[in-house]
Amino acid sequence: MSTILEQKCPCCGGAVEFNTGAQRLKCPYCDTEFDITAMPEDTSNQVEQINWNSQGAQWGAGETDGMSVYVCNSCGGEIVADTTTGATTCPYCGNPVVMKGQFSGALKPDLVIPFKLDKKAAKEALKKHISTKKFVPKSFLTDNRLEEIKGVYVPHWLFTCDAMGNANYKAKKVKTWSDENYEYTEISYFDIYRSGNIGFDNIPVDGSTKMPDDLMESVEPFDLTQAVDFNTAYLAGYLADKYDVTAEESMPRANERIRQSIIDSFKETVKGYDEVENQGANMNVANGIYKYALYPVWLLNTKWNGENFTFAMNGQTGKFVGNIPTDKKSVTKASLLLGAGIGAVIYGLMWLIELL
Amino acid sequence: MTKKIFAIIIVVVICVSFVFSASAYTQQYVIDYADKLSSSEIEELDLFAEKLESAYGVTVLFCITEGTGDVTAAEFASGTYSDYTDNENGIIIVHDEWNKAYSSFISGNADEVFSDAAVDSMIDAYDSNDSYYGGIYACYELAEEYLENGYSGGYVYDGEPLNNDTDTIDASEEKGGVSIIWLPVSLLIGLLVGFLIINGIASKNKSVKMQENATVYTRPGSMVITGSADNFLYNNVERREKPKQTEKN
């Protein structure tokens, strides 16, 4: 059985949580606040290991694959979690717990960006997000219920490198002139070549298969200048996963983004043309290093018409994303009304021109 | 979003210009067998003739030809009139460039307006002008004057006053209108544009997407261009004739 870590209040023994407002640990029972550095990183000497003899059916071979069992230090309850879970709350006593083995040794993150925004801010952001959208089904606004809201430290790989590349573009210049009898249009075609170097710092790639990649990339960017060295105390009160996508597996996505950046950045140096179109690019990467970091994300799940809708908020900057359903009837109705109006205006203009 | 708005504006402009151009130019009133007029001149004169037809119910055709073939000038005029219009009331003036001769054919109630003297004056106006376009335009201006005069009860040279009670020529019914057929066309275009605009707004409800690049993570000042070449490949020149006034021989 695995062991877990709880940050205990030295005053009352209650489980402490990371407070986003104070950016310190706070005991929800006696309101005492502590600096992150004041808390011990590893309190393994306090961990109890309790073994129970099962009288029920035994797990079959392979049934426990992908599953880990932990025991809550506060109430002794058994916590079953998947192998990537790094921090959660005890389902019996609600105390936040950190599975310390998930973030130790080689698995220890280099950096963590602490949550700056709390659950209340995430709820308000969801309301604002929905209220500013058009053609949202009325029943979604009234019947939609927030099923779950959770703050998650999402594992990310951060790639830093110097990229060298070259790109080819096809460009056009259009020139028009006229003489007494004719109008001339000259289109000149050019082959453009650019090569050069660009440095990239900390390109994030989602390291968790549980999190949709498009959702994680949509809440970017995070401000890494506010990142701190990893300490398990930051995880208290939040969920956290360890990576299950390795750095090597994440590299192709980072390379893809670097390649497109080279194409886009070099294209901006192609000036004086009316049209520029990329024809291909090559890229090499040098001095590549990667880091392992945990990024704060609020995940909000709602259910409507039997369908799940997941929203995400950047726990640092507050950027909020999430797809909202559209009311097809409202869209059709509005299209018809607007279309009829525009049609009437066009016909009216025809009359006006005819009369003039 | 800017690209979408721009695309929508382009679509609207194209659609509107299509409607206006289509509504404005439908039938041929100036027949240029001798190839003396540019297409834009013909289009402009056709618009003038169409205006006369819609206002007075009388078709005024003008034909420039180089010979009349095996038929007489009168037969050529009446045949051409029948070929280009079904309107019972109208006139055609034919200029035979080859034989330096003029002929005309008048159909239906148009003879109440276009007396011999009126036709002669129209031909004189055409003949005395330096350009074909200017001549036909002057001819149409006179035709308009005679038609307006005739409908207001006035006299046209030595002709009789026009009978305003005829059912076939009713200016008040025809003047200053756009055919109802353009209403569904306008609505169709409106619906297309409306659909594009509303769907553009509705698409904002989707905010989850993969990032295209990593430009935001570029190290400030790190981009260095080490090689650069802009090579000319080839060019194409297209020439289009400008609308112009054609000089007479």
Image (cartoon, rainbow, N blue to C red):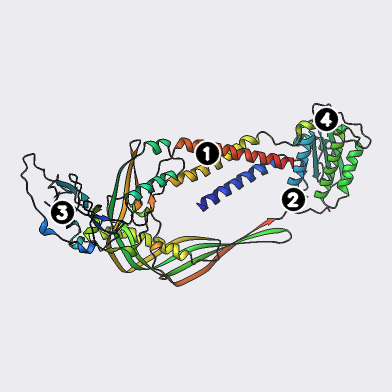
Number of on-image labels: 4
Distance of label 2 from label 1 (alpha carbons): 43 Å
Q: Which residue is mark 1?
A: A335
Question: A177 or B147: which is nearer to us?
Answer: B147
Question: B130 or A305: which is nearer to us?
Answer: A305
| Chain letter belonging to callout 2 | B
- Of the numbered discs 1 and 3, the one sitting upstream in the chain is 3
Question: B49 or A290: which is nearer to us?
Answer: A290
Q: Which residue is mark 4?
A: B108
Three-letter code for the amino acid on which mark 1 is drawn: Ser
Three-letter code for the amino acid on which mark 4 is drawn: Gly
Label 2 packing within 10 angstroms: few (<14), some (14-19), many (20+): some
Q: Which mark is residue A4?
A: 3
Q: Are marks 3 and 2 on the same chain?
A: no
Distance of label 3 from label 2 (alpha carbons): 90 Å
Label 4 packing within 10 angstroms: few (<14), some (14-19), many (20+): some
Q: Which residue is mark 2?
A: B38
Distance of label 1 from label 4 (alpha carbons): 49 Å
| Chain letter belonging to callout 3 | A
